[in-house]
Amino acid sequence: MRFTEREMTVGVKAVAQQLMVATKPFGRGSVEERWERLTPMGRYEKLAAAGELVLPLLVGLPDRPTVGATPEFTTEEWEDAAAEAQRSAADARSPGSWDALSERKRRGAVAVVVRLGRTAVAAMPVRQDPDAIVVPDHL
């Protein structure tokens, strides 16, 4: 699917924050406060890891131009896009490695990526109608 740069940025950040909390569940303050306390390199590392997991999935989703709502996908569409993204990533590292995994491990990997993808899409801002955008006169 074609998401805007802003949508993808917000989605990847939401996934990175969720992964931060999952890896270090005990911390003081809200998720945003903990995120801000990270060093710039720490934030970059988490964003890069989240992007590697989520971006191929988001690109693999079918196109759903929705205005005023969050795009919705069927469970099958999520799983197909996640399986293809994971297959491509695994085979890029080592050809044939995806097929070498057991069915149980493949299903587990797909389920995790689908969950993270749903988190990313849920965090994205609601799409606005591009034809209804009003440009100020001073521009």
Image: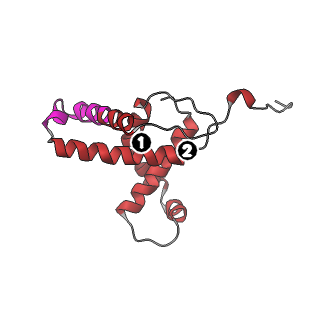
Task: Classify residue 44 as left or right of residue 106.
Answer: right
Majority SS type along the magenta span: helix
For the point 74% across and 30% down, the residue is: 132
List the residue tagged with mark 2. Answer: 124
Circle 1 — which element? helix
- What amino acid is at disc 1? Gly
Q: Is residue 99 magenta?
A: yes
Q: Position of residue 69 (x, y in %)?
A: 60, 40
Q: Residue 18 or 78: which is nearer the viewer? A: 78
Give the SS element for disc 2.
Answer: loop
- Let me know if residue 139 is in the magenta part: no
Q: Residue at x 30, y 31 (%)?
A: 84
Mark 1 burial class by Cα count in 10 Å: few <14, some 14-19, many 20+: many
Position of residue 111 measured from the top left corner of the image (x, y, whole percent)? 31, 46
Q: Residue furthest right?
A: 137
* Picture coordinates of residue 130, whole percent (x, y): 68, 29
Q: Residue at x 56, y 29 (%)?
A: 65
The stretch of residues the image draws in magenta is 84-100
Kind of residue indicated by mark 2 = Met
- Give the percent coordinates (x, y) of residue 63: 49, 27
From mark 1 to mark 2, how far is it between C-alphas?
14 Å
Of tags 1 and 2, which is closer to the observer? 2
The quadrant in which the C terminus is found is top right
Counting labels gives 2
Classify residue 41 as left or right of residue 80.
right
| Structure colour scheme | secondary structure
Mark number for residue 51?
1
Whether residue 50 is visible: no
**Frontmost residue, 47 versus 39:** 47
Which residue shows up at 86% across the image and 30% down it?
A: 137
Relative to residue 10, is residue 64 depicted above or below? above
